[in-house]
Amino acid sequence: MFQSGVEKIGTENDLAEAELDNEILSLQQQVSRLRARRSIQASTILSSPSTLSTLNSLREHEQLLASPEDFDSLVSALKTQISHNQTNLYRLCATVTSFLIQDLDPNAINKGQVLALRFDVSSRGSFIRPYYVMFNKPWEGESRTILNVHRHTLPPAIPLRSLVKRYLPDNENTSLVEAPATRRPLRQSLLRFSRALRRFIVAYHNRLSTINGLRTYYMPDDHEIRDKIDTGKFLLDVSPIDAEIKQIHLEWVDKRIGRLVIDEDGKIKKCVVLDDGVRDRVAERILQSDMSSLGEKLEEDYQRKTRISLSISSSSSSSSSSIIADSD
C-alpha cells in the first residue's frame, strides 16, 4: 500500500514537471515571436518615407526634443535601416555580382588579376551567406579571353566541374599558338555559366529548406518523445541520403519507411513507401508531387492513415460487443 502511494506521488510529480516544462517552452516560443515582431515593426517604421520627414521637422523645432542624444540615435538608426534596405534590394534584384580583385601572390599568372562572381540566395525569408567563384586567365595577354576557375566557396553538392566543362571549356588543346588554323576554338559563355550555377544553388537550398521545414513542423523533439506528448507530429526521421539532397529518407511514427527521388526542378520523380515490408501504393500516389507541396501531401496521407486506424478500432470494438452479447 505504501509502495503504491509512493508510485502515485512520483507519477503526479512527473506529470507536474512535464506540464511545467511545456509551459516554459510555450513562454519561450512566445518571447521569440514577440521579439521577431518587434524587430519587424521597428524596421517597418524606420523604412517609412514619413519617418525621415518627421525627424527633419523635429530638427527644426529643437525645443520639442527631449535631448539631442535621442535625436542622434534615431537618425543613426534610420540611416542604418536605409542602408540595409538598399543592400537587400540590390541582393534581391542583382542576384549575381561581378567584380575584380587582386591576387597578392607575386607569382600569380596574368599579374594577379582575378574576376569574381558573387551569388546571393535567400532561404526561408532571409539571405544566406553569399557564394563566390573566382576566375583567372591561364595564359598571359589581352587576346587570351579564356577563363579558368581559380577558387570557389560552393558546397560539394553543386556540380561545378560539369558546369565548367559545359559552359567554360578550357581550350587547352586549341590555343591560338598550337591549334591548326582550321580548328575553331571552343567558346566560353560566362553568362550562361552564372545562370546555370545560380539555378543549381537555388534548387539545392530549396531542397534543404524543405527538409528543415519538415523537421520543424512534423518531427517531435526529444522532450516530446521522452514524455510521450501527443503533438500530432507523425515523422520520426527526415534525412537526405546524398550530398545533393536528391534522395530523401522518411520514417513515420507508424513504422513506415519511404524514399523520395527528386530532380533538379524539385519534382518527385520516384517514391517508395513500405508498410511492414509491403509497398503502400496509396501513399506513393499521394506523395507523387513536388517539394513545395510535400508537407501538405504528408498531412493528407497522415489523415488518411488516421481514418483507417479509427475505422479498424471501431470495427473491432463493435465485433467484441456483439461477441459478448451472443455469449450472454
Image: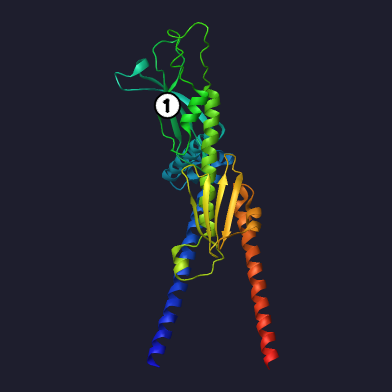
The answer to which quarter of the image holds residue 258 is: bottom right
Q: Where does residue 38 sit, x and y in percent of width and height?
A: 51, 52
Instruction: Mark yes or no: residue 286 visible.
Output: yes
Colouring method of the image: rainbow
Q: Where does residue 107 sit, x and y in percent of width and height?
A: 30, 18
Residue 298 relative to residue 157: left or right: right
Residue closest to the far front: 277
Quadrant for the C terminus, please.
Answer: bottom right
Residue closest to the far top: 181
Name the residue at 55% across, 40% down. 203
Name the residue at 55% across, 41% down. 47
Q: Which residue is mark 1?
A: 134
Name the residue at 51% across, 37% down. 201
The answer to which quarter of the image holds residue 153 is: top left
Q: Nearer the viewer, residue 275 or 151?
A: 275
Helix, strand or loop for disc 1: strand
Tell me the crowding category of disc 1: few under 14, some 14 to 19, or many 20 or more residues within 10 angstroms, Cα based: many
The answer to which quarter of the image holds residue 173 is: top left
Q: Where does residue 89 sit, x and y in percent of width and height?
A: 55, 35
Instruction: Mark yes or no: residue 89 visible.
Output: no
The amino acid type found where label 1 is placed reads Met
Q: How many marks?
A: 1
Q: Where does residue 72 sit, x and y in percent of width and height?
A: 44, 41
Name the residue at 65% across, 72% down. 310
5 vs 268: above or below: below
Residue 67 relative to residue 60: left or right: left
Quadrant for the N terminus, please.
Answer: bottom left
Q: Nearer the viewer, residue 33 or 267?
A: 267
Residue closest to the far left: 106
